[in-house]
Image (spheres, rainbow, N blue to C red):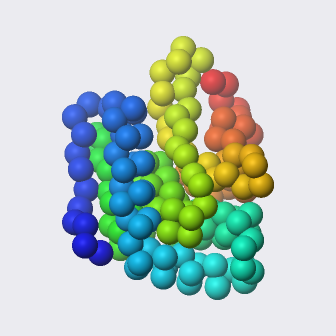
Amino acid sequence: MSAPLKHWRIPGRDPFRTRQLVDELARLYGGHPAMRDITAGILRLAGVGQRDDLGAARAIWAWVTRRVMFLNEAGEQIQTPARVLINRYGDCDDRTGLVCALLESIRIQWRTRLLATAEGVPFHIWPQARIGGRWVDLETSDDRGRFAEHPARLMERLRGLQL
């Protein structure tokens, strides 16, 4: 890839700045032909047919969930999608950036969302894909998640947390 294979350390934890960087990196790396090649390989492995955006989103979600280990970090650091592919680990922003870059590479519309506490304090980022006119959640932070499951529902189901 022509962009640098590195990570950025962000002072403090500013979820809005994190989201901005994740979005920028996903667009940058998603436009690279090598990312499209990787996405094509993921779709082939999953047996996804042509023009099957739902199948593609599901295959990308499953691949990242199963093949990229979730690993927290000290402080806030953001890896490029290429670095996540090399390392095969990352936290929610890293995995979100990779999912979005893979979606971008095949022109599936995506966005990132921030999950907040009941007090309105953002603490988690996750991707969504626009499929058939609706936004589909692609939460990858826990491999016990289900396709299209909202992260708040996943947390409630697995841990009994109330947000």
Image coordinates for residue 97, horizontal then vertical, percent:
44, 55
Image coordinates for residue 15, horizontal then vertical, percent:
39, 33
Q: Nearer the viewer, residue 158 or 130?
A: 130
Residue that protrudes farthest toward the right in the picture:
132
Q: Is residue 53 above or below residue 134?
A: below
Q: Is residue 121 left or right of residue 6?
A: right
Residue that protrudes farthest toward the top in the picture:
119
Image coordinates for residue 43, horizontal then vertical, percent:
63, 79
Q: Nearer the viewer, residue 2 or 144?
A: 2
Examine the rendering and report whether any part of residue 131 can be seen: yes
State the residue at coordinates (24%, 50%): 8
Give the quadrant of residue 75.
top left
Q: Is residue 64 above or below residue 127?
A: below
State the residue at coordinates (47%, 32%): 123
Q: Count of labels shown?
A: 0
Q: Is residue 5 above or below residue 132?
A: below
State the residue at coordinates (22%, 34%): 11
Q: Is residue 101 left or right of residue 151?
A: left
Q: Is residue 148 above or below residue 63?
A: above
Quadrant of the drawing holding the C terminus: top right
State the residue at coordinates (59%, 17%): 118
Quadrant of the drawing holding the N terminus: bottom left
Examine the rendering and report whether any part of residue 148 can be seen: no
Image coordinates for residue 150, horizontal then vertical, percent:
69, 42
Give the quadrant of residue 74.
top left
Q: Nearer the viewer, residue 25 or 6?
A: 25
